[in-house]
Image (tube, rainbow, N blue to C red):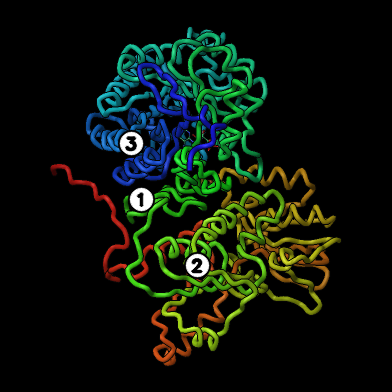
Amino acid sequence: MARDPRYDILFEPVRIGPHTTKNRFYQVPHCTGMGYRDLSALARLREIKAEGGWGVVCTEQVEIHPTSEITPFIELRLWDDQDIPGLARMSEAIHRHDALAGIELAYNGMNGPNLYSREVPMGPSHLPIATFTADPVQARAMDKEDIADLRRWHRQAALRAESAGFDIVYVYAAHGFGTLQHFLSRRYNTRSDEYGGSLVNRVRLLREIIEDTKEAVGERCAVAVRVTVDELIGPTGVHKEEMAEIIGLLAELPDLWDFVLGGWDNDSQTSRFSEEGNQEPYIAGLKSLTSKPVVGVGRFTSPDAMVRQIRKGLLDLIGAARPSIADPFLPRKVEEGRIEDIRECIGCNICISGDMTMSPIRCTQNPTMGEEWRRGWHPERIAAKRSDSTVLVVGAGPAGLECARALGQRGYRVTLAEASAELGGRVARECRLPHAGAWGRVRDHRLQQLAKLPEVEIFRESPLDADQIFEFGYAHLVIATGAYWRRDGIARHHLESIPIGEGARILTPDDLMAGARLEGSVLIYDDDHYYMGGLMAELLVAQGAAVTLVTPASEVSNWARNTLEQHKIQARLLHLGVRIETNQAVARIERGGVATACVFTGRLRELAAETVLLVTARLPQQALYRGLLDRRGEWTAAGLASVTAIGDAWAPSTIAAAVHAGRRYAEAFEEPHSPDAMPFRREVTALAGA
Ligand SMILES: Cc1cc2nc3c(=O)[nH]c(=O)nc-3n(C[C@H](O)[C@H](O)[C@H](O)COP(=O)(O)O)c2cc1C
Ligand code: SF4
């Protein structure tokens, strides 16, 4: 199909310093949890973005010197010439598809404890380092020699970036992560020399580094500057008015301005806390302060929203991290007039959890993310079928939908049978919870794609038992029947049932998602620690209940630190009037209340509640699966060759894991493999001389 002329503007070339990008789609720097450990995997990941049509594809932040590294996080490194070939592999991969390659040079300074190098971190002032983990380490204030060193190191890194083939070299002063931003901020910069005090002084180091970089590589590389336009902490931080002055001071110096909002948590806000395009008020007006192109972000998945940003004069280039992760082929789809095929980011930040847990990036919507090199998966392509085998997939949740879709894409004939009237399984239920609507895109995208696959037939309201399955005569059966929440309290804290007295009223999230409404006093016991406990609290407050949330953890939704949401969730619940009791495990449930035990002392307390909502653990829905295994002797006569449980029906986990499991089944189906072989490729570091 031809592209809609409305979107022509997105395909205009834009000059960036000595280069011209072929269109306005710009993959801004984003890390992947792969970094220096998984270089070939990372090169392939970036290549696929370039193949998908992004005019510019950037690396993540790249550490430029061992005096500033952010172990345990795994980023790229450009410490010396040894690092050049790995990065060159990336730029070459990007160039193969006619995209520009950008590299973000980063000196984190007081943002990293230097656990690997054991060098003393440096910053503008003597201050404790500002990390997620509150390491007991302080940065020392840089003297003039240190500043000269930093300028030299940055220059050397820029030259190495140039020789690694990059077209755009970033100077990074954003997210509260880089020394250059720390110097800008009067919160961190309490110096009394010419690098502190007045704005002109605080800007000095940034100016010098931009000038150094331009001087070193400016002929062959564009120099981009990434800044946080507002730290969102009021007058003590960098704020929009001050940033306007900063841009005024440096306006024409870089070749490109890249604007972001706040720390990483406010830049990469989840859909639970913000809408697409939420950064607009913060960047409005800034572009007029420079004649250089401006890139900005805002979880842009809609080409109409993108066009609007350009027509309104807010941006020249549409920056995207998450939309490019969820759909590396987004630009191509716009170009080919296939808007409905765009796999829209749901704003869950599971991608960020990869980096936060030092594991390769993953994505709820795009199961191939991070698997491009090690498993050879591609977001748009999959191997053709090997036979005319037929597959019955039971259960149309995230695992079943993706499995049926990917098998259908391979050309297999698939029947997808869902017991209920509604497709989507847990996604359909969970996306009705407060602020979770965007999660429905996991279902919507797959249904939209399935509608194009004549090989896949979908049956709703079709609960199946073993006898019916034997009658159908399918060769292969996939059980994707999901999971259900436990009612006995067993989870992380309790490995045995919590004692429950007679007449106690106990519900689980399944009851609320099925429509139960609660008023009066409700005690949520959250031993799950991700989003469900907080969402249940929000839902119940909206229903008029008085909610107490008890958790054995030291904070609400503890794991959501990995999606940069924990503090926002806790703040929201506090604002809603939810009473929060941390470090408490429910020890006993009675009619009208519970006893909780302090996780440290065991000291018991009584808390009154008419209803207890257990958000603890889930059990796989395996009745059908187990029933079929019990009748294995009848399989051959029924023509059944394999029965496989996938996703939550195998072991409950995230939606991302369920989608991945569906894809994995389809990718591996009838492909030769040995159970003893490594399930994926990995890169083993070459040994240096002893
Ligand atoms: C997984 C992930 C990793 C990121 N890593 C970086 C990084 O290394 N450097 C950086 O400047 N920004 C980083 N960001 C922020 C993004 O560049 C971007 O500014 C932000 O996510 C908002 O854009 P989006 O809504 O298009 O995702 C990261 C974002 C994500 C989602
Ligand atoms: S993991 Fe979630 S937030 Fe990240 S790109 Fe995928 S869908 Fe978007």
Q: Does mark 1's beta carbon lie closer than 8 Å to ligand 2?
A: no
Q: Is residue 624 visible?
A: yes
**Rendering quarter of residue 246:** top right
Cα distance, mark 1 to mark 3? Answer: 16 Å
For discs 1 and 2, the disc positioned in front in the rendered view: 2
Residue at mark 3: 97
* Marker disc for residue 372: 1
- Report the side of 556 relative to 377 (left or right): right
Query: Which numbered disc, 2 or 3, marks the residue that appears first in the sequence?
Result: 3
Q: Position of residue 541 (x, y in %)?
A: 80, 53
- Regarding mark 3 in the picture, which secondary structure is present there? loop
**Rendering quarter of residue 551:** bottom right
The answer to whether the residue labelled 1 contacts the one labelled 2, judged by CB atoms less than 8 Å apart, is no
- Amino acid tagged 3: His
Q: Position of residue 544 (x, y in %)?
A: 85, 55
Give 430 or 155, whichever is nearer the viewer: 430
Q: Position of residue 445 (x, y in %)?
A: 55, 53
- Regarding mark 1 in the picture, which secondary structure is present there? loop
Q: Is residue 384 above or below residue 102?
A: below
Residue at image coords 67%, 51%: 437
The answer to whether the residue labelled 2 contacts the one labelled 3, judged by CB atoms less than 8 Å apart, is no
Q: Position of residue 327 (x, y in %)?
A: 48, 45
Residue at image coords 73%, 47%: 573
Q: Can you say which quadrant of the picture contains the C terminus?
A: top left
- Amino acid tagged 1: Glu
Mark 2 neighbour class, 10 Å CA radius: few under 14, some 14 to 19, many 20 or more: many
* Marker disc for residue 456: 2
Query: Which numbered disc, 1 or 2, marks the residue that appears first in the sequence?
Result: 1
Q: Is residue 598 visible?
A: no
Mark 1 neighbour class, 10 Å CA radius: few under 14, some 14 to 19, many 20 or more: many
